[in-house]
Image: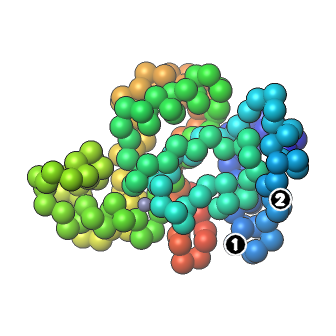
Amino acid sequence: MRNLSFKTPEEALEFLLEGNKKFIEGNPEIKNYCFDSMLKSLEEGQKPYAIVLGCSDSRVAPEILFDTGLGELFCVRTAGNTIGPNVLESIEYAVKKLKIKLLIILGHQDCGVMKYAMSAPLYNDCFENLIYQVQSVKHEKGLQDYDTLAKEYLEVCKHRLLVKSNIVKDAFEREGLKIVKAYFDINSGLINIIE
Ligand SMILES: [Zn+2]
């Protein structure tokens, strides 16, 4: 385990973006995930410094993209980074119990859920929960391409977290929780922050 401590969520974010650069350059700092070298030092417990809400897509593994070890990121992943009750409570747990001050909402290029939402009928009996949230953004904004939809959907995620969760809202407004929207470009490996 690396001995990391950050004074601010901004510092933690900067560190993670540096890790993403190392991933792109093919020179990651974390090369060994073996039990002895990594997990043993975490026997006493975890103290992750960032929450990542991301997609379940097999190409979008936050620990690898940000070049982090075990014990550093609290990851909540669903198809299309969509937010249902269990997702919300997982994030609330990380905010309230683990006191994490940085929350990254990570969308990505070529997302299957966004693609499906572009063409799926408005009312259908499969993927109902996944598609409904995403499609409402598509219709509201009149979007025509799924990568733009993935980026626009990040703001909906942020809004949803703040509206649906008093724990997240209080932490955001009063306790210095930083919520960041980020987009992973599969072609380049780069994770960009979206303002
Ligand atoms: Zn996806």
Mark 2 sits on what residue?
32
Q: Position of residue 173 (x, y in %)?
A: 51, 26
Mark 1 sits on what residue?
24
SS for dot 2 = loop
* Residue 195 seen in this snapshot: no
Q: As drawn, is 80 to the left or to the right of 92?
A: left
Front residue of 116/188: it is 116
Beta carbon of the mark 2 residue lies under 8 A of ligand 1: no
Amino acid type at circle 1 is: Ile
Query: Where is ligand 1, by quadrant?
Result: bottom left
The local crowd at label 2, few if under 14, some if 14 to 19, many if 20 or more residues have their Cα within 10 Å, is: few
Amino acid type at circle 2 is: Asn
Q: Which residue is at 36% across, 37% downward? A: 84
Quadrant showing the N terminus: top right
SS for dot 1 = helix
Quarter where residue 114 is shown: bottom left
Q: Which residue is at 74% across, 46% downward? A: 70
Residue placed furthest toward the bottom? 187
* Residue 172 seen in this snapshot: yes
Disc sitting over residue 93 in the figure = none
Give the CA separation, mark 2 to mark 1: 18 Å
Q: As drawn, is 141 to the left or to the right of 43?
A: left
- Determine contact: label 2, label 1, CB under 8 Å: no
Q: Which residue is at 82% across, 62% downward? A: 31
Q: Position of residue 142 (x, y in %)?
A: 20, 62
Q: Which residue is at 65% across, 32% downward? A: 100
Q: Position of residue 60 (x, y in %)?
A: 55, 61
Beta carbon of the mark 1 residue lies under 8 A of ligand 1: no
Front residue of 177/76: it is 76
